[in-house]
Image (cartoon, helix red, strand yellow):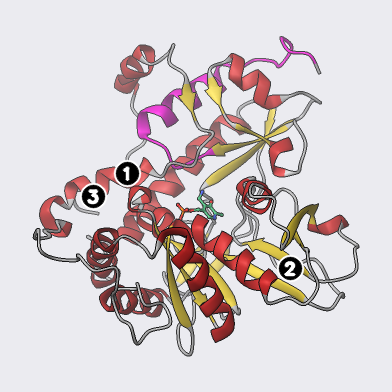
């Protein structure tokens, strides 16, 4: 696409790699700086100017359940989901949050406080997004309790299952796994259900769905997320949580998110400018390069993902998850080994899995990704660490 070529790294880049060869590369966090180049090339397109007298009130629309949601942001969210076809927005309440992290906690509060029996068990199938553990345990709430892996959960009584699809950390497509017991609720985290990460195979219509601006366009610093909620009582409780927690969500951030979301919706069908075309090429190329390195040796493993028809792109595509679930063939502490190589990753044990797997962010800067591949390619064995 014009001006946005995602090219393979040439030998001339090896100089840069040399310079960075001693640096610590942090691929533990999923800071989505990968798309910054696109936004730099968009120059002033999404510049937002806010006058000193604007956006001063706590309130946005007092007739809305979510009274701090800017109406223009609500319109932009609906238009984007309609254009991409990844989620139903009709007959749903939109609750905006300071990132979907805040909304996840608001949802735990809402679902558990509406439950008759407490504490409500909170589970997720391993490997899971490790932050759920902290979100469900940190305040030691009497309303809910983290109970670990959903696959081995067999308690009676109400529970909340976190379902992340595509999954962070391993990129798999997920459905709820706990079956049976009454009073089960599901929070569907669709942070990565966008066409640059995965084929859009259906329009999701679950009761409680979370989305984040951070992982769509890379604007994690704006801290904007939203929930699409069917049940008004759940939406009201979430709004109550957000009111007590932060009296709403920054209007500046909502305004910026509105501009950027409108822009990616407007251009989503224009091949030369579409953010999703760019993002999907970028992620595809990173995955091809990583697979090439992994397959050239006999030390590491990566999951294989089935191709599927993407309703948005109108063709069959391969998934390119935001994280690589890197494993090693021998029984080793891979996170510890990579740390010795000055590559920080998230150990699989933190995600309810084992130490021979790590979660590697695929969303960082080009330079860091190049150095990571370079270091991975030069590893000949895992001998220098204890099992
Ligand atoms: N859910 C998942 C699965 C994530 O990976 C992340 C970000 N790492 C979040 C939620 C939170 O995103 P944010 O708070 O930036 O909206």
Crowding at dot 2, Cα within 10 Å, few <14 / some 14-19 / many 20+, comes out as: some
Which residue, given by chain and number where applicable, does mark 3 sit on?
39
Dot 1 or dot 2, earlier in sequence: 1
Q: Position of residue 10 (x, y in %)?
A: 33, 27
Do we see residue 94 in this rendering? yes
> What is the quadrant of the N terminus in the image?
bottom left
**The magenta stretch spans residue 379:** yes
Q: Give the Cα separation between the discs numbered 1 and 3.
A: 14 Å
Dot 3 or dot 2, earlier in sequence: 3
Q: Nearer the viewer, residue 371 or 29?
A: 29
Q: Position of residue 51 (x, y in %)?
A: 8, 60
Which residue, given by chain and number where applicable, does mark 2 sit on?
176
Crowding at dot 3, Cα within 10 Å, few <14 / some 14-19 / many 20+, comes out as: some
Instruction: Give above or below for 92 relative to 111.
Output: below
Q: Secondary structure at mark 3?
A: helix
Relative placement, left or right, of 27 versus 367 is right
Segment colored magenta: 361-386
At 42% across and 13% down in the image, what residue appears?
Answer: 21
Instruction: Give above or below for 229 relative to 35.
Output: below
Q: Secondary structure at mark 2?
A: loop
Do we see residue 124 in this rendering? no
Q: Secondary structure at mark 1?
A: loop
Q: Nearer the viewer, residue 116 or 207?
A: 116
At 60% across and 79% down in the image, what residue appears?
Answer: 207
Which residue, given by chain and number where applicable, does mark 1 sit on?
6
Instruction: Give above or below for 48 relative to 15.
Output: below
Relative placement, left or right, of 318 versus 353 is left
> What is the quadrant of the C terminus in the image?
top right
Q: Position of residue 300 (x, y in %)?
A: 68, 30
Q: Give the Cα separation between the discs numbered 1 and 2.
A: 36 Å
Q: Position of residue 299 (x, y in %)?
A: 70, 25
**The magenta stretch spans residue 70:** no
């Amino acid at each position: 696409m014009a001006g946005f070529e995602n090219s393979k790294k040439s030998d001339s880049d090896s100089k840069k790699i040399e310079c960075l060869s001693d640096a610590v590369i942090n691929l533990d966090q999923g800071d989505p700086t990968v798309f910054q180049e696109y936004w730099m090339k968009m120059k002033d397109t999404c510049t937002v100017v806010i006058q000193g007298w604007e956006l001063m009130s706590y309130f946005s629309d007092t007739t809305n359940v979510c009274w701090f949601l800017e109406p223009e942001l609500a319109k932009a969210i609906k238009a984007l989901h309609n254009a991409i076809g990844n989620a139903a927005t009709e007959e749903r309440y939109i609750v905006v949050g300071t990132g979907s992290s805040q909304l996840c906690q608001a949802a735990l509060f809402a679902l558990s406080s509406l439950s008759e029996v407490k504490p409500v068990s909170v589970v997720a199938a391993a490997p899971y997004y490790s932050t759920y553990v902290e979100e469900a345990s940190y305040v030691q709430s009497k309303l809910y309790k983290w109970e670990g892996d959903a696959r081995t959960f067999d308690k009676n009584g109400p529970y909340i299952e976190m379902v992340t699809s595509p999954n962070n950390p391993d990129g798999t497509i997920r459905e709820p796994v706990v079956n049976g017991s009454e009073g089960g609720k599901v929070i569907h985290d669709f942070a990565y259900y966008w066409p640059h990460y995965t084929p859009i195979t259906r329009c999701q219509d679950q009761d409680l769905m979370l989305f984040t601006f951070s992982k769509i366009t890379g604007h994690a610093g704006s801290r904007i997320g939203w929930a699409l909620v069917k049940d008004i009582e759940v939406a009201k409780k979430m709004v109550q949580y957000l009111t007590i927690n932060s009296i709403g969500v920054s209007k500046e951030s909502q305004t910026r998110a509105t501009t950027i979301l409108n822009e990616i919706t407007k251009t989503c069908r224009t091949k030369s400018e579409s953010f999703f075309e760019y993002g999907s090429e970028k992620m595809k190329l990173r995955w091809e390069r990583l697979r090439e390195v992994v397959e050239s040796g006999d030390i590491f493993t990566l999951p294989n993902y089935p191709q599927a028809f993407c309703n948005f792109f109108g063709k069959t595509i391969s998934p390119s998850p935001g994280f690589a679930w890197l494993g090693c063939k021998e029984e080793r502490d891979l996170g510890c080994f990579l740390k010795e190589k000055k590559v920080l990753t998230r150990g699989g044990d933190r995600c309810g899995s084992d130490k021979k797997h790590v979660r590697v962010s695929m969303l960082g800067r080009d330079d860091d990704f190049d150095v990571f591949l370079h270091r991975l390619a030069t590893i000949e064995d895992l001998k220098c660490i204890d099992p």
